[in-house]
Image (spheres, helix red, strand yellow):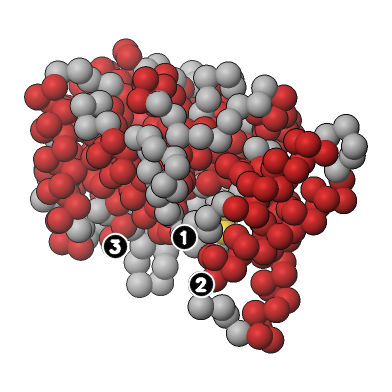
Amino acid sequence: MIRVLGDIDAAEDAVQDAFATAIRRWPVEGTPPSPAGWIITTARNRAIDQLRRESTRADRHAQAALLHRLHTTDEPAPYAGSGPDEEGPVRDERLRLIFTCCHPALAPAARVALTLRLLGGLSTAQIAHAFLVPEPTMAQRLVRAKGKIRAARIPYRVPAEADLPDRLQAVLAVLYLVFNEGHTASSGDRLDRPDLAVEAIRLGRLLAELMPDEPEVLGLLALMLLVESRRPSRTGPDGGLVRLAEQDRSRWDRRLVAEGQALVRRCLRRDRPGPYQIQAAINAVHSDAATAAETDWAQILQLYDHLLAIAPSPVVALNRAVALAEVAGPAAALPLVDDLDLGGYHVFHAVRADLLRRLGRTAEAALAYDAAAALTRNAVEQDFLRRSRRALPGTA
């Protein structure tokens, strides 16, 4: 619909109306043979009616051309490739829309945020959580990004091969954040959202086929596969969170581990390290250890040193401190954590709580666990943090 209408807001309205109509009619009339086709056709008809109502004499020629396109555009199937008149390197509808939203005319943060909103199934609040910014700030970014696309007439089209590299970093960031939301949901009663993780990996595989010579594409795919391999062991029989150190590694998906490790080896042979490749290598080291005690934390710390050098951020520094605590002890890591400006990030407080617990500073650890639990809206994480607090000796 965006491709045909050339307007994100109009397409969203049309599709939303189609889903609302489906909710009313399908329980009574039954689900149609092609649900996606029904939604698209209904959305198209809604857009036609809206255009006819709003058309004026001044724009009637443009509206007539658009109505002709709406009437004649072939109905696409879910995740369909391009129509016969749309030649180009990106054949998948969703991947094409990601590349469209990641247009260089948009600010980098806006590119990622807009794509997460349209394709990631993430609410404005969830995107704000991922960027560690207030929700109103993120809402303004999204409005500006959609307005820029409309005002600059940025087309929804198949990018030329020459356009792909300039958009790649934003596209990778989108897939990474969609996967992260799938791995640990920012809100809700479940720890994860497997549907998002599976979709991010699917798009990652398509991107790797499209750009097989880009090591960061392979690195991101390897990272997602290695992290996804641990999903079966991340929750216990009661649905509670299980820390990496306590996971039953026999439940890890060895097929995904092998595929991810093979991709890491391909990246190493390229010798063009980037942030996603280094993160994939860190997870490959974790996957090499048969038990938590056998983890090569010294190697992981070296990899975090490299990552911090090429992609410095407070979150990377926090993760490096976790590795340092395993190598040199919690007393070495805590001052580095305390220097980070991450007060609005629940993981920061959770890491502090664990380090303080290990140092025997239980009263401070309890406060840190409380702060972490107050900042996350994921019920499973909240339960884990509260149980950890209750397990502290000498605290109420």
- Horizontal and vertical percent position of residue 28: 69, 86
* Element marked by disc 3: helix
Q: On the picture, is 320 further left or further right than 291?
A: right
- Horizontal and vertical percent position of residue 154: 61, 27
Q: Quadrant of residue 56?
A: top right
- Along the polypeptide, which appears first: circle 3 or circle 2? 2
- Along the polypeptide, which appears first: circle 2 or circle 1? 2
Identify the residue under disc 2. Answer: 34
In-front residue for pair 179/186:
179
Residue, x 42% and y 67% (percent of image)? 239
Residue sitting farthest toward the top: 309
- Disc 2 and disc 1: Cα gap in Å? 9 Å
Callout 2 touching callout 1 (CB < 8 Å): yes
Residue, x 16% and y 37% (percent of image)? 263
* Element marked by disc 2: loop
Other residues around mark 3 within 10 Å, as few (<14) / some (14–19) / many (≥20): some
Callout 3 touching callout 2 (CB < 8 Å): no
Residue 54 visible? The answer is: yes
Marker disc for residue 232: 3
Identify the residue under disc 1. Answer: 77
Q: Amino acid at mark 3?
A: Pro
